[in-house]
Amino acid sequence: MTTADTGTLAAEPDFYHAQTKHKGILGWILSTDHKRIGILYLLTMLVFFSIAVILGLLMRLEMLTPGRTIVEPQTYNTFFTLHGVIMIFLFIIPGMPAVFGNFMLPLMIGAKDVFFPRLNLLSWWLFIAGGLLALVSLFLPGGPADTGWTFYVPYSIRTTSNVMPALGAAFILGFSSILTGLNFITTIHRMRAPGMTWFRMPLFTWALYSTAWIQILATPIIGITLILVALERWFGVGIFDPAMGGDPVLYQHLFWIYSHPAVYIMILPPMGVVSEIIPVFARRTIFGYKFIAYSSLAIAFVGSLVWAHHMFTVGMSTTGMFVFSLLTFLVAIPSAIKVFNWISTMYKGSIELEVPLLFVLSFIMQFSIGGLTGLMLGALAVNIHVQDTYFVVAHFHYVMFGGAGFGFFAALHYWYPKMFGKMYKKSAAILSWVLATIGFNCLYFPMFFLGYLGMPRRYYDYLPQYQSIHIIATVGSWILALGLLIMFINLLTSLRRGPVAAVNPWGGETLEWKVSSPPPLENFHDIPVITAGPYDYSKYELHAAEMK
Amino acid sequence: MQLSEEHQQDVNHHRTSYGHYVLVWLGLLAFTGITVTLSGMDLGRWVIISTLAIASIKSVLVANVFMHLKSEDKVFTVFVLVAVATLAIFITLTFFDYAFK
Amino acid sequence: MKTTTANSQPVHGHRDDVGTKIGMWLFLFTELILFGGMFILYAVYRFKHPEEFHLAAKELDTFVGTVNTMILLTSSLTVAMSIAAIGQGRKNLSMALIGTTVLMALAFLVNKYFEWGHKFEHGIYPRSPELLAKPPGEILYFGLYFVMTGLHALHVLIGMAVLVIMMVFIKKGVINRQSYVRLEAGGLYWHLVDIIWIFLFPLFYLIH
C-alpha cells in the first residue's frame, strides 16, 4: 500500500528504551502502552503455558501403563482439570488477542494506541490475578479442583476439592477477556487512519473484530454460570442442584453457550494471522479478501448457534439434537472458504518457504483434520459412539493446539523481528517446527483410533488392549516437548545473541512493517494516509510475469 | 462508518427538553399501571405475552429517549439489536431442546 | 512523552465522546447478557413448572413491587434530566437531580431489605426447612428470585456509587458543560439497571 511518509525520526528510541512516566519494572507493569502490555501478556502467558504443558506431560506419563504409573487417581483428575483450565483460560483464549492483537492492532490500522489504554492495563492485571488464583488452588487444603475444566453439576456442587478458586479465577479471566474485546471494537471503529476504510483493513483486524464481538456477547454467560455454581456451593440456592429440582442439563446449556463460541475466540485470530502470512510469503495478494473478511463474521455468528453439540448424549429432545447437528454442519462452510482462499493464494504464487509459512502449512493441515473430525462428531449417529472418548480429545487438540496453537507459533515467528528487533536462528526454528509437527501428530492422531476403539476420556485406568496406542502417544508428547523446548530456547537466546532485525525482513505490506523494529513508543510520527488495500503485491506479480 | 479524521466534537446537539423527559416518564408510569391491571385479570396465557410486550415497550422508551439511542449515530442501534438478537437466539435455541422433550 | 488526557482519551489529540459511549454501550451489553443467562434459566424452569411458579409468586407483594418499579422509573427520569442540566451548564441543578436519583435508589434498596426480611421471617431462604419441603418448582422460583433480585440490588448499589462519584466530578469541575460524557456513561449504566428491573418485575410479581 502506498502511504505518506510515516518516518520514525532517526534518533527516536524504540518503545523499550523510551522515556516513560515510571522507571524500571514499574515502567512496565504500570505502562498503558499497548506494545508493553502485549509483551507482558506474552511473558506471563508463557509461564502459564509451560505449567500446563508440564501437566500434560505428566498426564501422558501416567497413561503409559494401565493402573497406577506415577500418581493416584485423584491427582490425575486434578491434573486434567488444571491442564484444561490453564490452557483454555490462561493461554488459548487470551493468547492471540492479548499478545498480538494488543501489539499489532494499533500499528496495523495506523493508530498510536488502543482507545482505552488504561482499561488495557487493567485487562492484564486481571489476567495476572486470575492466573495466580488458579495456581493458588494447587496448594490449598482439599487439593485443586477435580471436576474437569467444565465444572459439570452436580459433581462440582458436591466435591470438596477447591472448586471456588477455580471458579473465581475463570470469572476474573472472563472480565479480562471482555475488556480486551470492548477495547478492540472501539479502537477499530474509531481509530483507523484516514483513508483506511473497513475493506482496506488487514484481515487480522477483521479477525480481531469478529473475535471481540464474541468476547462481549458470550463471556457474560460463563460469568453468570460460574457465579451460580459458587452460590450453589455457598448458599444452596437450588438452581442447579437436582436434589432441589435443578436441571444439570440446563447447566450444560449455559456452560456451552459460552464455551463453544469460546473456541471461535481461540481460532479466529490465528486464522487472521494465516491470512496475513500467506500473502507475504506467496508474494500474492490474498485471494478473495471480502470472502475472508465476511467469513470471520459468519464464523462468529454461526458458531454461537451450535453449542449443544457438546450435549448429544445427555438426553436432549430429538428436535433439539437435529437442529444443533444441522447448525454444526453449517459452521464448517465459512471455515472451508478460508482454507480454499488460502490455498488459492498460494497457487502459482512465488513461495518463500520461511519459518512463519512452515507453521502456517502445519496449521492448515492440522486445522483441516480437526475441522473434518468435528463434522464427524457433529453427526448424531457417530457422536453416540465417540462422545466422551479419546476421539473428542484428539479432535479438539487438533483444532485448539494444531490449529490455534500452531497459529500462535506462526505469529510468534512472523512478528518476532518487529516486536524484539532481533532475528532468531532459522535452522533452530526449522528444527523446532519439524519436531513439533511430528511430535504433535504422533501424540494426537493415534487418539482418534483410541476413541474409535472405545477408550473413554478422563479415565485414569484402561484395558490392556489400549496400551500400545497410549505408548505411541506418550512418545509423541516427548518429541513435541523437545520441539517446544528448542523453540523457546531459540527465541529466548536470540533476544540477546540474535542479529539485529531489519525494519521489514519479510517484505510485508501492512503498516506495522513501515515502522522501526521495534517500533517507537508512539508508533507513528505522523499518522499515515491510506490510499489502497493491505496486500498490494502487484509489483511482484508484474516482475514475476516479466521473468517468464 | 466514521473515519478517525472526523474526530470533531460529536456533541449531541439534539437536546431533549425536560418536558419531553417528563412526558415519557408519565407514559412509563401509565404502562406500569396497565400491566399491573392486566395481570390481575384472568387472561390465561395472554398474561405473560402482554406483560412481556409492555415491558419491551417500556424498555424501548427508556433506551430511545432516556439513553438517547434515537438521537445517536445509527451504529448504536445496530449494536443494541445485535445484542438483543443474540439473547433471543440463546433462549430460542435452548427451547428447541426443552419444548420438544 | 505518552500520556492520556484527563478523560482518558488517547493521545491522538481529539477527545472522542462517541468512542467513549461505544465502549460504555458494549459494557452494557455484557451486563444485559449476564442477566440474560438468568432469564434463560427462568424461562426454562417456568416452562417446566408453570403451576408451582404461580403458587410461589403469591408470596410476593405486588404493591411493593409496583412501588419499587415506579421508584426506579422516576430515578431514570432524574438522571436523564441531570444530563440535560449539565449540558446547560446548570451545575447545582444537575447535582441535585443526581442526588435525588441516589436517594430513590436508596429507597428501592430499603424496600428490598424489608421484602427479603419478610421472606426470611416466613422461613423462605435458601436451604431453609420450610423451603425444602416445598415442591421443586417453588424451590426453583425462590432460588431464582433471590439470585436475580440480589444481583440486581448489587448493581443498584454499584450504580449509586458511580452516581455519587459523578456528583463529586461535577463539584470539582471535571464534568462540566463542555465535557460531560462521563455523566452520560454513568446515566447509561443507571438506565440499564432500570431496564433489567422493568423485566424482573412482571416475571416475579405479575404471575397470576
Image (cartoon, coloured by chain):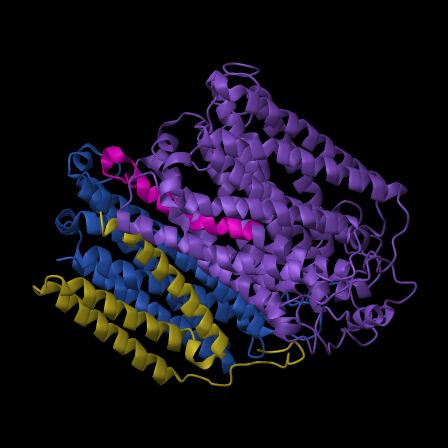
Q: Look at the picture and state if A223 lies above or below A472.
A: below
Examine the structure image and report whether residue A260 is included in the region drawn in magenta: yes
Q: Quadrant of the N terminus of chain C?
A: bottom right
- Magenta: main secondary structure: helix
User: Does the image show residue C102?
Assistant: no
Q: In percent of the image, x 59 and y 47: which residue is there?
A: A367
Residue A357 lies, in percent from the top left, at: 74, 51
Q: Look at the picture and state if A274 lies above or below B72.
A: above
Colour chosen for chain C: blue
Q: Residue furthest front?
A: A548
Q: Residue furthest top?
A: A68
Examine the structure image and report whether residue A164 is included in the region drawn in magenta: no
How many callouts does the rendering have? 0
Q: Quadrant of residue A470?
A: top right
Q: Going by the image, does A318 lie left or right of A416?
A: left
Colour chosen for chain B: yellow
Q: Quadrant of residue A380?
A: top left
Q: Quadrant of the C terminus of chain C?
A: bottom left
Q: Look at the picture and state if A527 lies above or below C194.
A: below
Which of A371 and B35 lies nearest the eye of the viewer?
A371
Colour chosen for chain A: purple
Q: Going by the image, does A8 lie left or right of C19?
A: right
Which of A448 and A233 lies nearest the eye of the viewer?
A448
Which of A334 and A349 lies nearest the eye of the viewer?
A349
Magenta stretch, residue numbers: A238-266
Residue C171 lies, in percent from the top left, at: 54, 69
Q: Going by the image, does C63 lie left or right of A319?
A: left
User: Does the image show residue C194?
Assistant: yes
Q: Going by the image, does A379 lie left or right of A262?
A: left
Residue C103 lies, in percent from the top left, at: 36, 63
Residue C157 lies, in percent from the top left, at: 40, 55
Q: In percent of the image, x 80 and y 49: which residue is there?
A: A23
